Amino acid sequence: MRAKLKQYLISSLIVLSLIVPSFSFVEATPPKKGNFCDRISEVENKIQEKIDNYQKKLEEKRQERIERMEKLLEEMENKRKENRSKWDENRKEHFEKLKSKAKNDAQREAVEKFIEAVESAISVRRSKIDSAVLSFKKAVSEAIAKRESAISSALQEYKNSIESAFEKAKSDCANGVDPEEVRKNLHSALKSAREKLREELKSIESVGESLKVEAQKKREEIHSAIEEFKLKVDQARQELKKSLKER
């Protein structure tokens, strides 16, 4: 049982390490050479292309993380089913040996009562562990969705700021503002937008941080289920010993 609990704890940490994303930032700085107003649309297109490529790579990495996580969770689930199947076979053999040692009807009845108690305890333990694992998986999915939503909102706000900065620059150019002044103002606006994005991304809580409470809750529920199971089986074993001695 301890090995199983350890497996769940380690697996949880692995899942968290796979789903925390990292970021680089799009450098959106207009060049200095030539009449800036004559090339502002070209500059805007290049910067927009960089942003689009950045978002594309971000989405690709996100999909890779999700696929790795789903694969890991599937492997964990299959391993759990495999282990349970082995335990079921071993337990069945143990119960058959126990039945063969019963010398009379009274002892056979006591053995059957013991088997029933153990099977019931196993069913309860598995149900509680499955519930804890399922709740944690749900919490992971919700945490990822919340983080991705916050990131998407921050990136969209950044894109809107970039668009507004270029619209202002185009308007200034059309109104005869000095191209060098337009370039400097645009550079400042783009820098501010980039710094704001950086701060917003830093402020978004990581998946690992947001799941600390849920991970602890899962550990406690699994530990409680295992301890409760041990207690019930020990009680059933004591009852069996008592019954066999009396009969």
Image (cartoon, helix red, strand yellow):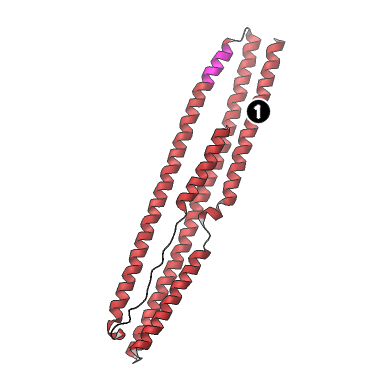
Say which quarter of the image contains residue 96. top right
Quadrant containing the C terminus in the rendered view: top right
Residue type highlighted by circle 1: Lys
Of the 4 image quadrants, the one containing the N terminus is: top right
Residue 109 at what x, y percent from top left?
63, 14
Question: Residue at position x 46%, y 69% from top?
Answer: 197
Please name the residue that numbered disc 1 is placed on: 232
Q: Residue furthest bottom?
A: 176
- For numbered disc 1, what is the local secondary structure? helix
At a point 61% along the width and 38% down the height, the residue shown is 223
**Closer-to-camera residue (136/104):** 136
Q: Residue 174: which quarter of the image?
A: bottom left
Residue projecting furthest to the top: 103
Badge 1, how many Cα within 10 Å: few under 14, some, many 20+? some
Vertical side of 229 occupied by 175: above or below: below
Q: Where is residue 77 in the image (x, y as percent from the top left)?
A: 46, 38
